[in-house]
Amino acid sequence: MCNLLRGLLTLTIPLLPKEFIGLLAIAFLVSMLTQFFAPAEQSAIPLLVEAPGLMSANALFTTTIIGSLIVGFAIGEPLLSWARSTLGDFGQELLVGGSVSHRCWNFAGNSHWRGSSLTPAPDRSLE
């Protein structure tokens, strides 16, 4: 739900007047929603991975997050410049908002994540 709201907030950017305070408000709201999403995402790892693999899973998760930030910044500017020149004045906003909304839509509708393939790891703390 948080991802969907973040995507919708991003899609509202073209509808706002081009003032800094509007972008600041959107950034604040998106960051506020992220504060609920990020801890929930991280806390799901112990449900999916058994205790011996937990350190590796946490390391892989963190490496993936940091790696995506590095790659995102590296390809972000050329991609946003292309969107502005191809799609017009609101091309950048449409690219970012559309990609976030598409990701949320696919995640919510992906039957693989709702199936039995993600059953929690057995609780062996009482053994």
Image (spheres, helix red, strand yellow):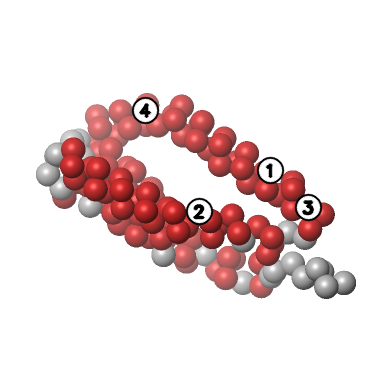
Looking at the image, residue 65 sits to the left or right of residue 46; the answer is left
Q: Amino acid at mark 3?
A: Gly
Could you say where residue 8 lies in the image, as x and y percent from the top left? 30, 57
Query: Circle 3 sits on which residue?
Result: 53
| Image quadrant containing the C terminus | bottom right
What's the mark number on residue 38? 2
Badge 2: few (under 14), some or many (20 or more) residues near its Cα, within 10 Å?
few
In this view of the protein, can residue 101 be seen by the observer?
no
The residue type indicated by label 4 comes to: Glu
Does label 3 or label 1 sit earlier along the sequence?
Answer: 3
Q: Residue at x 63, y 46 (%)?
A: 61
- Give amino acid for label 1: Ala
Q: Which residue is mark 1?
A: 59
Where is the N terminus found, in terms of image quarters?
bottom left
Q: Amino acid at mark 2?
A: Ala
Could you say which quadrant of the image residue 41 lies in? Answer: bottom right
Disc 2 is placed on an element classified as: helix
Please give left or right for residue 85 compared with residue 42 in the image.
left
Within the image, what quadrant is residue 3 found in?
Answer: bottom left
Marks 2 and 4: which is nearer the front? Answer: 2
Question: Which of pointers 2 and 4 lies earlier in the amino acid sequence?
Answer: 2
C-alpha distance separating marks 1 and 4: 28 Å
Q: Do the numbered discs 3 and 2 sit on residues whose CB atoms are within 8 Å?
A: no
| Of the pair 28 and 48, the residue shown nearer to us | 28
Residue at the (68%, 64%) spot, across then down: 47
Instruction: From the image, tell me which residue sits under label 4.
Output: 77
Gap between marks 3 and 2 measured at Cα? 21 Å
10 or 54, nearer to the observer: 54
Q: How many C-alpha atoms fall within 10 Å of the one at disc 3: few (<14), some, or many (≥20)?
A: few
- Give the mark nearer the N terminus: 1 vs 2: 2
